[in-house]
Image (tube, rainbow, N blue to C red):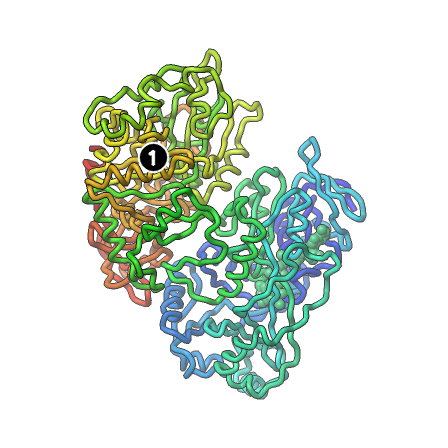
């Protein structure tokens, strides 16, 4: 075994071998795969070998398509047969709700280039002779579906990689991994030591144990999984003889089953409701090529449905039942990418469909390591989508739920209950009492809408029970004033003598002046959008009263004067002194004073909460080594409430002594001010597109601030609003959001964020040359808004946009804009047709709906409300 390698890949399952192959194919041949046993000694060897392109996430679907197309290449290069049978398949619906889901899938396939065709149950019966058409309402025919030989594929990757110069060391168990002072990784094995620049954890069933070697607790858990193989079936033989073809694949969603031909019989696998985790805490190292004890009782309910839906099974004996474990992340998608805080340590694990996804995972890792970028939008697989909150117990609850729902429909308004509530803010109980219906983002509960007593979400593809109530919340904001909980934003504090120069390089915008905020796109080198922030500049203060808060003597102060007298206006006690003891996240530097002799700025960045790890990984990767800049994710160290609507200022005026008039506190200003007794930071901004304020505070003040705002707002008819009302309002302002409109596959011009890019600023911000190139060549796409002629359902995202009879684009998000009274979609179309108004249609629920491209935003196009 070598003593040094550029990359060590740990694990010789299908995923590790794919990573090795892709590195070698890209020219990195000083790479070694270490496998503790024979190749395939984890989940890989006993897999059912099914493969398909369909995935809930369109970008993962693209990588699945890539994987399946790769098998010919590795077979040719390695000379090793992969046993690929591209049979095609049928996806079956036994209910109309499932059929609606399948129709949406067909529509999505159109812009992904995945061939899917809606067919009747009778037609499905002609393609797949074992099913009883009477049990189904319809189906979808798939072309790129099939099965393969799991061992053949794994060895083909490994042989092809070896041919290109990579090495594979079998029976070499990694026992320890340590980071050396020079930044390289020391990998200790039972056969000696090896030093590497990069280590990839592709440990599959042992990914947790390999992670623990570097102090990581990865959110993965193995579940037992069973499939059965029947005796030879005469129906199968007859079909083979008659058609000269195999029986095609079938997925029976309502039976929670998948089926395919296996020699002269059939293979039937099930994702049973009563799924069972395996080795919940630790995977035994002595587990290898053994199977688990089958448990027919556990899968009996699914088999019962299966035998009814596929009657030929009733007369056939079961030859073998395979029960084996394989791993899942909480949401069922892989965990891929570099790990924050461990430079050169990568994960490629939690891959539950190794034969559909392994190729794409290998490609993404190789691109990322070599080029610094995965080369595709892999947000849905990025390990950074989880934070420390994804504990072992959380993972256990979520993986069980995910397994039991593998083939279940998830309606657009459906929130899944397992592992919740986990992270909550101090006002959680208060808002629950007021009817909050909760959703979750990054483990944090956030109100979606407020339901009257006895009303709750009725899960549906169509407008549902919440519709009228969300409409009422929107009306409250647009006509009076609404209050919402906004703690789910990520907040980062950037400090240090080098903060300004560093941010000027990280962000494509011009940095705001002290006391101001601005929208701040962040780009990667190729100009792709990797952040849509609001950045605020707060000037450090060296004592005396805060400069932006002249004592306010206007009306409406009286009722809070007594409350806030202790802290204002006599100056800020903390700010007067030089004490910097135990700085709080919000006030640490604001109150503590700047560097002696300088006046360094402090910046706060607000961004999408779900991308906190993703952004911190990026920030930390780019921090200067001299320690002149500090970045800190404030998490729930800071929480927030927002008020918005025409009466928002009048409410704020009642609870603060600060002058919040438009002249003194204009749009995009940010200041420290007390809200009643609570020290807060208030930004004049609102995602609703209305006059509004975001009020940030330390958690211990949040209940106080909530009570004060609701009390002060009562005379104006203040009401609570949730994320669904916010979505409705941001749609009528055509505001995009992270992971929807703003993703790394779009440039700032394409996404309509170019007006926030300071192309001419002197700082050489990351992605500048690519952004300039996009500006001159115009990019390829444009984000556009559409009013959709919808009746009882709205788009949700990922629907195709037709233009004059051809699919030209895709929807990124949508919904009903209650104030404007129209259904709205946001989506990307080629720039060539971005100037056209007519001829557009958006397909959902099996029908194309006329859509009119909007030439202006639906609400407050001249900003009089927002800026007034
Ligand atoms: C019953 C069953 C049916 C399935 N059916 C399908 C299907 O039809 N289609 C599909 O796509 N997927 C299927 N799967 C899932 C599929 O098996 C997995 O997605 C895939 O095998 C994951 O591969 P992997 O390389 O990530 O992990 P593994 O196969 O578990 O490989 C990990 C490897 O790492 C090695 N290793 C771990 N730790 C160390 C160490 N410290 N040092 C050295 N080596 C180490 C292990 O020995 C092992 O060989 C099925 C799984 C089961 C159990």
Q: How many marks?
A: 1
Question: From the viewer's perspective, is residue 152 above or below residue 473?
Answer: below
Q: Quadrant of ligand 1?
A: bottom right
At 33% from the left edge and 53% from the top edge, which residue is drawn?
Answer: 435
How many other residues sit within 10 Å of disc 1, few (<14), some (14-19) or many (≥20)? many
Residue 75 appears in the picture as rendered: no
Residue 174 appears in the picture as rendered: yes
Quick check: 605 left or right of 314? left
Identify the residue at the far right of this view: 191
Residue 737 placement (x, y as % from top left): 36, 45
Quadrant in which the C terminus appears: top left
Q: Secondary structure at mark 1?
A: strand
At 55% from the left edge and 71% from the top edge, which residue is drawn?
Answer: 270
Identify the residue at the far front of this view: 562
Residue 193 placement (x, y as % from top left): 78, 42
Quick check: 863 left or right of 432? left
- Residue bearing mark 1: 695
At 31% from the left edge and 19% from the top edge, which residue is drawn?
Answer: 569
Quick check: 298 left or right of 852? right
**In the image, the residue with mark 1 has its CB under 8 Å from the nearest atom of ligand 1:** no
Question: From the viewer's perspective, is residue 789 above or below residue 33?
Answer: below
Task: From the viewer's side, name the closer residue of 100 and 468.
Answer: 468
Residue 772 placement (x, y as % from top left): 39, 34
Quick check: 682 left or right of 3? left
């Amino acid at each position: 075994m070598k003593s040094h390698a550029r990359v060590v890949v740990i694990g010789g399952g299908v995923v590790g071998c794919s990573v090795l192959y892709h590195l070698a194919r890209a020219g990195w041949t000083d790479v070694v795969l270490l496998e503790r046993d024979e190749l395939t000694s984890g989940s890989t060897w006993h897999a059912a070998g099914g493969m398909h392109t369909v995935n809930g996430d369109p970008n993962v679907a693209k990588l699945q398509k890539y994987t399946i197309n790769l098998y010919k290449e590795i077979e040719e290069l390695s000379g090793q047969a992969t046993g690929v049978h591209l049979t095609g398949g049928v996806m079956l619906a036994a209910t109309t709700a499932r059929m609606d889901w399948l129709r949406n899938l067909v529509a999505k396939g159109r812009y992904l280039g995945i061939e899917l065709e809606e067919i009747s149950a009778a037609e499905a019966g002609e393609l797949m002779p074992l099913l009883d058409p009477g049990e189904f309402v319809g189906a979808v025919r798939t072309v790129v579906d099939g099965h393969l030989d799991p061992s053949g594929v794994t060895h083909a990757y490994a042989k092809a990689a070896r041919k290109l110069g990579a090495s594979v060391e079998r029976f070499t168990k990694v026992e320890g991994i340590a980071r050396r002072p020079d930044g390289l990784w020391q990998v200790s094995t039972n056969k000696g030591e090896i030093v590497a620049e990069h280590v990839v954890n592709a440990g599959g069933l042992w990914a947790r144990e390999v992670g623990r070697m570097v102090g990581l607790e990865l959110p993965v858990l193995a579940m037992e999984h069973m499939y059965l193989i029947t005796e030879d079936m005469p129906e199968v033989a007859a079909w083979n003889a008659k058609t000269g073809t195999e029986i095609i694949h079938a997925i029976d969603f309502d039976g929670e089953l998948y089926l395919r031909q296996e020699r002269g019989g059939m293979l039937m696998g099930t994702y049973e409701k009563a799924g069972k985790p395996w080795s919940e805490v630790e995977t035994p190292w002595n587990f290898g090529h053994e199977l688990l004890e089958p448990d027919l009782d556990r899968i009996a309910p699914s088999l019962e449905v299966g035998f009814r839906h596929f009657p030929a099974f009733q007369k056939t004996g079961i030859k073998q039942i395979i029960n084996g474990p394989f791993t899942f992340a909480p949401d069922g998608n892989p965990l891929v990418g570099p790990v924050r805080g461990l430079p050169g340590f990568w994960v490629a694990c939690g891959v539950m469909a190794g034969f559909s996804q392994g190729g794409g995972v290998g490609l993404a890792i190789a691109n990322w390591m070599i080029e610094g970028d995965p080369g595709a939008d892999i947000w849905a697989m990025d390990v950074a989508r989880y934070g420390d909150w994804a504990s072992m117990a959380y993972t256990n609850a979520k993986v069980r739920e995910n397994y039991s729902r593998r083939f279940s429909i998830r309606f657009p308004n459906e929130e899944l209950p397992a592992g919740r509530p986990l992270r909550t803010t101090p006002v959680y109980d208060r808002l629950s009492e007021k009817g909050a219906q909760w959703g979750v983002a990054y483990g944090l509960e956030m109100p979606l809408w407020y339901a009257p007593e006895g009303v709750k979400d009725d899960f549906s593809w169509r407008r549902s029970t919440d519709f009228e109530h969300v409409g009422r919340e929107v009306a409250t904001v647009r006509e009076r004033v609404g209050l919402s909980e906004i703690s789910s934003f990520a907040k980062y504090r950037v400090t240090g003598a080098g903060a300004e120069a560093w941010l000027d390089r990280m962000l494509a915008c011009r940095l705001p002046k002290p006391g101001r905020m601005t929208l701040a796109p962040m780009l990667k080198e190729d100009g792709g959008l990797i952040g849509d922030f609001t950045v605020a500049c707060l000037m450090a203060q060296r004592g005396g009263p805060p400069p932006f808060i002249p004592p306010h003597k206007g009306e409406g102060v009286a009722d809070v004067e007594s409350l806030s007298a202790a802290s204002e206006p006599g100056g800020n006690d903390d700010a007067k002194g030089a004490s910097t003891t135990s700085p709080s996240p919000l006030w640490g530097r604001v109150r503590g004073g700047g560097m002696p002799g300088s006046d360094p700025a402090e910046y706060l960045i607000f961004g999408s909460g779900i991308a906190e790890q993703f952004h911190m990984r990026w920030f930390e990767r780019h921090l200067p080594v001299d320690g002149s800049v500090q970045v800190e994710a404030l998490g729930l160290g800071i929480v927030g409430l927002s008020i918005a609507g025409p009466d928002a200022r009048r409410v704020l005026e009642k609870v603060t002594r600060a002058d919040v008039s438009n002249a003194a506190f204009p749009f995009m200003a940010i200041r420290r001010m007390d809200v009643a007794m609570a020290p807060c930071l208030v930004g004049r901004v609102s995602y609703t597109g209305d006059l509004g304020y975001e009020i940030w505070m330390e958690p211990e003040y949040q209940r106080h601030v909530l009570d004060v705002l609701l009390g002060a707002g009562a005379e104006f008819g203040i009401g609570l609003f949730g994320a669904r009302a916010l979505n409705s309002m941001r749609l009528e302002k055509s505001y995009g959001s992270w992971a929807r409109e703003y993703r790394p596959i779009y440039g700032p011009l394409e996404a309509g964020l170019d007006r926030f890019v300071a192309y001419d600023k002197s700082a050489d911000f990351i992605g500048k040359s690519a952004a300039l190139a996009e500006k001159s060549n115009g990019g390829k796409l444009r984000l556009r808004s559409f009013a959709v002629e919808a009746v009882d359902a709205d788009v949700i995202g990922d629907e195709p946009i037709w233009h004059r009879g051809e699919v030209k684009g895709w929807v990124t998000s949508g919904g009903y804009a209650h104030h404007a009274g129209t259904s709205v979609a946001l989506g990307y179309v080629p720039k060539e047709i971005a100037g056209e108004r007519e001829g557009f249609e958006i397909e959902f629920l099996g029908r194309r709906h006329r859509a009119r491209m909007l030439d202006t935003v639906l609400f407050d196009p001249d900003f009089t409300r927002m800026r007034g």
